[in-house]
Image (cartoon, helix red, strand yellow):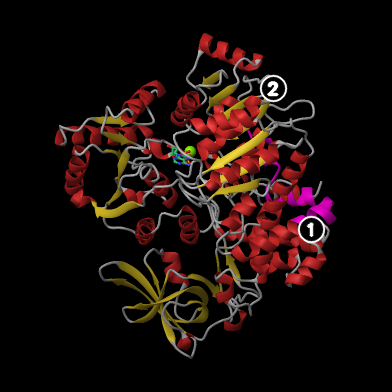
Amino acid sequence: MNSLQLSVTSLIGVTPDLAQRLEKLHIFVVQDLLFHLPLRYENRTQNRAIGSLAIGQKVLISGQVEFTDILRRKKRSMVCRISDGTGAINLRFFHFNTQQFTALSTGKLVSCFGSVRQGFAGLEIVHPEYKIVSALDSHPEQGSLTAIYPLTEGVQQTTLQALIKQALEFCVQQPDLLVDYLPEKLLLHYQYPSLLDALQSLHHPDKNTSLYQLENQNTPALKRLAFEELLTRSLSMLKHKSEQQRWKAVVLTAKQSIKNQFIHSLPFELTTAQQRVISEIEVDCNKPQPMLRLVQGDVGSGKTVVAACTALLALANDYQVAIMAPTELLAEQHYRVFSQWFKAFDYPIAFLSGQLKGKARERLLYEIDSGRARLIIGTHALFQEAVEFQYLGLIIIDEQHRFGVHQRLALSAKGQRIDSRPHQLVMTATPIPRTLAMLQYADLDISIIDELPKGRKAVITRVTPAERRFEVVERTRQWIAVGHQGYWVCPLIEKSEKLQYEAAEKTFQQLSVVLPQVRIGLVHGRMKSAEKNKVMQRFKAHELDLLVATTVIEVGVDVANASLMIIENAERLGLSQLHQLRGRVGRGSQDSYCLLLYQSPLTEIAQQRLRIIRATQDGFEIAEQDLRLRGAGELMGTRQTGSIQFKIASPDRDSQLLRPAQQAAHTVLQHYPASVEPLINRWIGDFIQYAEV
Ligand code: ADP
Ligand code: MG
């Protein structure tokens, strides 16, 4: 076995206890140390003349002790003054002991490192690292810049530095340990350093390397690593795609009369974008390979009806269809909508609720297994072991960003037969920047619904400090008095679900008191889904005017008459959540409002988020801005499982690398197939393929 793949305990000085702490930094095997990159650097390569120091610099200096004294001003401190002929500076210690005091006696030579600041009497360094030395020129200068690593509890900086050094030395002594999988042509073309050179220059940069360039993360070494990571991400998706393409799938032929009957029964006309996407899907499903198509469309663009047309296609070809939604609320809503839309056709429709237990559940599982149930709607409960399908021809995943890449990949095996797999339609409302979509969804063909149904009006968005909440309450009263409906959202403030629900409950009670004429309902995540649905149905039927809710309504809920969205503590929500919540209104032809209440003071980021959400309603634009604000893996929303987490690359900082890395992935897949597995192991591990649903 390659010794880089050995546990870190194989290194000198790593106890099982330390190894366990290193796991918090995602360091398990020796190789992980190599890819644990510094946060910043310190320059200890040169002794600076004390007379030349300026405030704010972090410096290595050495000098002779002039005197050491204990001062008792406001706070007791020990001050040691040293000079080197060019000037003098004070070293100040607030924590010290007698030993230190005696060691730093007059005449001693010390070398020290720390930040220069303005002190009471001239320049000083507080709590420097220091060492008594025997001669001024024997100072411990280092040959390269010193890397400072991100740490975790119980792991010292010096420990980590030493371990990484050990790991690098391994690679230098045995050059075949660390294989460079980037083709040489590519390295030459981009003028990238080899892998080992890159790692060395990041961990131990030459003393002449520009600190500025290093700290702005703009070195060829870092770019090369980011490139390799992005390439590998892309590669794993391409590999998944080519594996998928080896499977067969049932050919679904268009049944025009059934489709027309359905479309003509709808209370609206399909938009051109919807029609285009539907025909793209029909072409896919007509092939003997599984479709793998992603439909991206902003909130309210009408993805459900596209899903319905696709479902109908499979049903009309006598196959079963499974539709998966991220929440019970949304699954139930789909169940209701599809039951209504497909009334004229008699395909038995089943709703597999996660709350269904005992006999009833067994009966339903039997219906699915025996093939009697044709269209099956549910949450991820659909893909548990116990659920067997008779002849599943199509899987539809709604709001896929709620599920996550790994889950999606794991799902493709569901409904698999000897040599065939179901077609897959994946829908997502969270538009992500195109370059990133190309990476995250590299295994999917993408269709975009880039048009909203006719007659939609922009939602008028206002941002209001919480102190003016009473005005908002009054506006709500007026708005509802003329027959409109609205949502009042209390987002997660407390970490615990219980406290969160209490906050919604409190708001509900309080609003009930101040708005006695208004019929108010409450939904939150802790309610039983039957209860939740009862409230939703009453709201939909306009038996309720105002719905107080936690963010459970963020996903997919559709009530056209609701035209007011109030969001409390809006400063706590991400751009995507705000956008999705606002997307709940503006669905009818009346004017709609979104009022964002915030608690002062706002952080800089929160201010920017609120500014963006007020300025635009275009999901793609919001996604681009979000990427700019957040950078890496946290893109859109609260750390959605769906977005990729990177080790080193950052889609924002490395946006220029995305496209070339994707091209390079094709090259590697075609011409260097032997590198595919090792690259994936290095950057992703093999957990993706085997992830649990
Ligand atoms: P999303 O893309 O967010 O899932 P939905 O599918 O829930 O959007 O559609 C939002 C609303 O728009 C629904 O009430 C739906 O019936 C309606 N709708 C969908 N397509 C059209 C259309 N072409 N014209 C008018 N209304 C439409
Ligand atoms: Mg939807």
Determine whether the beta carbon of the residue marked 1 sits less than 8 angstroms from the nearest atom of ligand 1.
Answer: no
Element class at badge 2: loop
| Rendered view: 432 above or below 325 | below
Residue type, numbered disc 1? Thr
Q: Is residue 623 left or right of residue 313?
A: left
Judge whether residue 198 can be spotted in this image: yes
Q: Residue tagged by mark 1?
A: 667
Q: Position of residue 75 (x, y in %)?
A: 29, 66
Predominant SS of the magenta segment = helix
Q: Is residue 56 left or right of residue 419?
A: left
On residue 391, the disc is: 2
- In the image, 437 versus 119, the foreground residue is 437
For the C terminus, give its image quadrant: top right
Of circles 2 and 1, the one toward us is 2
Number of marks in the rendered image: 2
Q: Are marks 2 and 1 in contact (CB under 8 Å)?
A: no
Label 2, residues with CA under 10 Å away: few <14, some 14-19, many ≥20: many
Q: Viewer-proximal residue, 603 or 320?
A: 320
Q: Earlier in the sequence, mark 2 or mark 1?
A: 2
- Judge whether residue 140 is colored magenta: no
- Magenta span covers which residues? 666-693
- Residue 222 lies, in percent from the top left, at 64, 66
Type of the residue with mark 2: Tyr
Residue 567 locus on image (x, y percent): 31, 45
Rounded to the nearest angstrom, the CA distance separating label 2 from label 1 is 38 Å
Residue at x 24%, y 33% (from the top left corner): 508
Q: Give the residue drawn at x 45%, y 55%.
A: 618
